[in-house]
Amino acid sequence: MNYAMVARLVLKDWHLNRVTMAMLFVGGVVALGLIVRGGEIAGVMGLSFAFVVLILAGIMPPMWSIVQERKNKSLAFVMSLPISAFEYTLAKVVANTSMYVVVWLAIVASVLWMLAAGGYVGWVPLGVLVSLAPMAAFFLLVAVSLVSESEGWSILVMSACNVSYSFAWYLLIRQPQVRADATSGTAVWSALIVSIVAVELGVIVLSLVLTFYLQSRKTNFV
Amino acid sequence: MNGVAAHLRGVGKDYRYFSLDDIHLDIPEGHIVGFIGPNGAGKSTTIRILMGLVHQDRGEVSVLGHRMPVGQAAAKRDIGFASEDMRLYESETLDWHLRFIRSIYEAWDEDYARTLVKRFDLKPQQRMKGLSHGQRTKAMLLLVLARRPRLLLLDEPTTGLDPVARHEVLRELTDLLTHEGRSVLFSSHNTQDVEQISDQITFIDRGRIVESRDKETFLERWRRVRVEVPSGVRLPALAGVVELRQDGHLAVATTNAYAAELPHVYEAVGARVHSVERMTLEEIFVASVQHSREGARA
């Protein structure tokens, strides 16, 4: 395993995505600023905007660094470098995950801290559940874009995930117990919340395992 | 320089509408091998198999002593690969690409890189997005050549280049061989380019190697013989004559095994040999491919 080469490819993707990352950073700051400003409308707008930033952070780096690299015919250039297929896959997963996790952690940690500090600690389990959904979608998108190398399939997965959020939140918030727990003033990790969080983590792990497994079976890289 | 930089033995790859079949190919050290074939003949697939980017379904591939595709990471340290349909990062400058590649290859030759920047008339601060096709190709070749690879795999690098750019690129490739032990596989459907720089030539058509030998042998063995055939005279079928066309009293025999005796054989049966013509590589290629296709149909 050539870790130095993997590190160079990771840094290369960070460099190529620097504008995207800067935009996401600004978006995150604006979202958190709205929440800090206080007030119901600004708070809801801030939370919604923070969620939008999480979704965008899960879409833009994979689309730019994986799908567009293939579409712009730069993949052959990367694969002509002294790397194996596994090292390429590892570099892409590490680069995209690191870019996503930086944004995700900054926003989610800040929002959860603000919820807890603002006396909304009951919303924290729901906040964790909601914030893990775009992360699961991100890993799914990384898997599909790496394995299929198809812009069409990637857009389909991305769209399906985005559409499903509203539906999932609607079903979740209709549960009387979920609403009651959220407004209870203490963090209640109900069986339903834990089960959904487990499913989200399962999607993340499965996506990663399938990414490496299917990439190892691939016989055409450009 | 008697070694072999790369070889393929019985290599095959199956796609839904195309198969590469039973490919045997040697790239001797210190030689430029011209790889000629029509569009869709299998040139790119063969080169990508050599790079480990496409995995063969059968057969054995060895590049610089590494078995492919498992040894691709080590082999690619000493391979320079450029393809007509390969692109650099459009948002980045040539300078960024130079620094990126320099950080990877220990053998990077900074002086040679600077020389090539000037010789190719490139601007390091210019983004790839603003470059013409010719400039992009030269930038790609610069990144490949300055790392001083032992083996160069070039997939149609001169396609779409203007005559001046083509000349510059071909001159660099020829100069490259002044460095002992460097080998080149150069694919093209432009036979002029291949004829100009190659010393070994391989024809590929419909996924199969049609012919493979050194350039001089190709040019020596292929001849077109124009013959006047009087009434009542019938030209004999000779081994090595791949095509015999007759229109009235004039016949044209194309042979891939020319020997000085051939005109005498025709004259011995009463025919009159008008001329024995050398063929260009393009004519040889077309005749060879047609002969191979007729053989496949028969």
Image: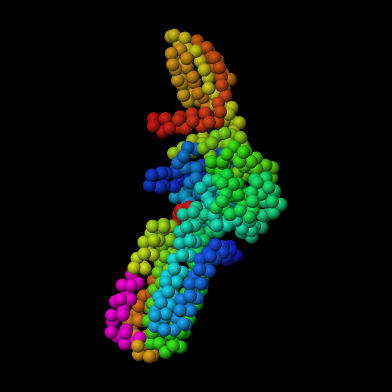
* Residue B39 percent location from the top left of the image: 46, 39
Residue at 32% x, 85% y: name it. Answer: A179
Q: In front: A98, or A111?
A: A111
Is A70 or B154 nearer to us in this picture? Answer: A70
Residue B33 vertical placement versus A179 (above, below) = above
- Is B72 rendered above or below residue B278? below
x and y percentages locating residue A165 in the rendered image: 35, 72
Query: Magenta stretch?
Result: A164-182
Residue at image location 44% in from the left, 50% down from the top = B57
- Place residue A116 in its image quadrant: bottom left
Residue B154 visible at all: no
Q: Is residue B120 left or right of residue A147?
A: right
Counting from the top left corner in percent of width and height, residue B136 is at: 57, 48
Magenta region includes residue B5: no
Residue A221 in the image, given as x and y percentages of width and height:
47, 54
Residue A177 forms part of the magenta stretch? yes
Q: Is A40 on the left-hand or right-hand side of B275?
A: left
| Magenta region, main secondary structure | helix
The answer to whether residue A180 is visible is yes
Residue at the farthest top position: B231
- Give above or below for B272 relative to B113: above
Q: Quadrant of the N terminus of chain A?
A: bottom right
